[in-house]
Image: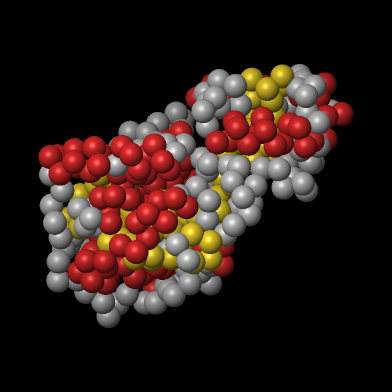
C-alpha cells in the first residue's frame, strides 16, 4: 500500500479543483444530489441493478499479506464515517493497521483512482456521483453496494395525519403551514423547490430554508412537544432512529428515485487486499441498522460526533452477531 502524505493529498486537492467545478460540489451531510434525469447508467454500467450483498462469500479462507490499509471518508457524510469505522474496528481486531483520510468527493475519487487511498464506501449511484464515475471509473474497482434506499424525502412525525406529500396542501394548518428545510445550496432544497412544491401545489407552505442543524432542532422540539411537523430529510439519516418520524409517500416521484451506495478501491488495492475487498462485498446495512449506528455516533444525546471508535464498539456490543454474519457473507440473507 502506498502511504498518503500531506504533500500528496495537497496535490490531489489541487488537481481535483477543476473536477469539483465540473462535477458539482458534494452535498452537505451526505444527502443525495437530487434532480437529475432517469438515466441509471454511468460509465457503461447500470448501477440501479445492484442488490446489497451480491457476491457475498465467507472470508475465512482469505488473507492479505499486506496488513496496512487506508480508508477514505467523505467529509460530512455520516454514513461514510459509520461504514469506515465499522470496517476499521473489524480490521484492527484482525491485526491490520488502518489509516483514515477525510476528503470531499472529488479529491476522494482522484486519490483512490491514483492509488493514494485504498478504499472508500460512499459512492452514490446512479446520479449523485455519476460524473466522477464517468471520469475515473476505468481506474476503480467496484466492490458492490451495501445500501439501496438512499433518497430525498419529506418526513413528518409518525402520528400526524398526512400520508402523502400532496396531503400537505390541504392539511397545512395541521403543520403550522410550514415545511422546514436545510441549506440553500443543498440538492434536497433544490429538488423540494423545483419539483415537490410545484408538482404537489404546496405554495401555501412557508418553506423555511436554514441549515441541517436548525431543521433537526425543530424536529426534536416538535416531536418532544407532541406537535405535528414536516421537514425535508434524506435516507440514510440517524434522525429516523432518534425521532418518531416517517416519510410521506411520493406517488408523483417528485423527490426522485432511491440510489444505491457502493464501495470502491483502486486496482492495486483490490489485488493487494482480497480480504478487505471481500469484506466490503459482504457488507449490508438496512435502514434500522444504519440509523441506529449513526444515531449512536452523531446525535447529541449519544456521542455527538466524538469518539467514533467507542460508538462503533458500543453498537457492535448491542449487535453481537453482526460481525460473524458479515464475515460469513450472511448479512444479505
* Residue for point 60% across, 21% down: 209
* Residue for point 53% across, 51% down: 127
Q: Is residue 83 visible?
A: yes
Q: Position of residue 202 (x, y in %)?
A: 78, 28
Q: Position of residue 140 (x, y in %)?
A: 33, 62
Q: Quadrant of residue 91?
A: bottom left
Q: Is residue 314 visible?
A: no
Instruction: Out of 47 and 219, give the one closest to the viewer.
Output: 47
Instruction: Out of 100 and 142, give the one closest to the viewer.
Output: 142
Q: Is residue 170 left or right of residue 41?
A: right
Q: Position of residue 322 (x, y in %)?
A: 42, 62
- Number of marks drawn: 0
In the picture, the quarter occupied by the N terminus is bottom left
Please, is residue 6 above or below residue 109 in the view? above
How does the figure colour the protein chain or chains? secondary structure
Furthest-bottom residue in this view: 61
Please, is residue 134 above or below residue 206 in the view? below
Instruction: Out of 315 and 89, give the one closest to the viewer.
Output: 89
Q: Is residue 225 left or right of residue 100?
A: right
Q: Quadrant of residue 218?
A: top right
* Residue for point 50% across, 55% down: 125
* Residue for point 79% across, 35% down: 200
Furthest-right residue in this view: 170
Amino acid at each position: 500500500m502506498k502511504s498518503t502524505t500531506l504533500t500528496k493529498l495537497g496535490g490531489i486537492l489541487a488537481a481535483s479543483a477543476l473536477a469539483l467545478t465540473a462535477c458539482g460540489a458534494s452535498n452537505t451531510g451526505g444527502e443525495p444530489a437530487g434532480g437529475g434525469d432517469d438515466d441509471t447508467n454511468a460509465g457503461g454500467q447500470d448501477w440501479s441493478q445492484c442488490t446489497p450483498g451480491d457476491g457475498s462469500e465467507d472470508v475465512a479462507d482469505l488473507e492479505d499479506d499486506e496488513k496496512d490499509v487506508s480508508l477514505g471518508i467523505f467529509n460530512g457524510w455520516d454514513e461514510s464515517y459509520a461504514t469506515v469505522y465499522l470496517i476499521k474496528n473489524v480490521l484492527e481486531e484482525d491485526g491490520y493497521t488502518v489509516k483514515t483520510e477525510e476528503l470531499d468527493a472529488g479529491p476522494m475519487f482522484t486519490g483512490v483512482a491514483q492509488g493514494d487511498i485504498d478504499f472508500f464506501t460512499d459512492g452514490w449511484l446512479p446520479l449523485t456521483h455519476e460524473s466522477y464515475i464517468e471520469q475515473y471509473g476505468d481506474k476503480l474497482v467496484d466492490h458492490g453496494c451495501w445500501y439501496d434506499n438512499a433518497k430525498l424525502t419529506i418526513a413528518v412525525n409518525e402520528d400526524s395525519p398526512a400520508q402523502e406529500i400532496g396531503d400537505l396542501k390541504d392539511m397545512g394548518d395541521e403543520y403550522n403551514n410550514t415545511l422546514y428545510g436545510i441549506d440553500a445550496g443543498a440538492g434536497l432544497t433544490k429538488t423540494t423547490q423545483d419539483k415537490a412544491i410545484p408538482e404537489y401545489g404546496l405554495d401555501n407552505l412557508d418553506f423555511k430554508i436554514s441549515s441541517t442543524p436548525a431543521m433537526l432542532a425543530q424536529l426534536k422540539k416538535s416531536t418532544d412537544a407532541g406537535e405535528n411537523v414536516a421537514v425535508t430529510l434524506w435516507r440514510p439519516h440517524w434522525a429516523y432512529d432518534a425521532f418518531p418520524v416517517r416519510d410521506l409517500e411520493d406517488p408523483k416521484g417528485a423527490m426522485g428515485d432511491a440510489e444505491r451506495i457502493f464501495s470502491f478501491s483502486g486496482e492495486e488495492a483490490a489485488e493487494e487486499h482480497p480480504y478487505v475487498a471481500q469484506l466490503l462485498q459482504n457488507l449490508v446495512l438496512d435502514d434500522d441498522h444504519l440509523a441506529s449506528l449513526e444515531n449512536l455516533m452523531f446525535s447529541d444525546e449519544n456521542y455527538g460526533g466524538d469518539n467514533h471508535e467507542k460508538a462503533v464498539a458500543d453498537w457492535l456490543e448491542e449487535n453481537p452477531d453482526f460481525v460473524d454474519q458479515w464475515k460469513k457473507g450472511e448479512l444479505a440473507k
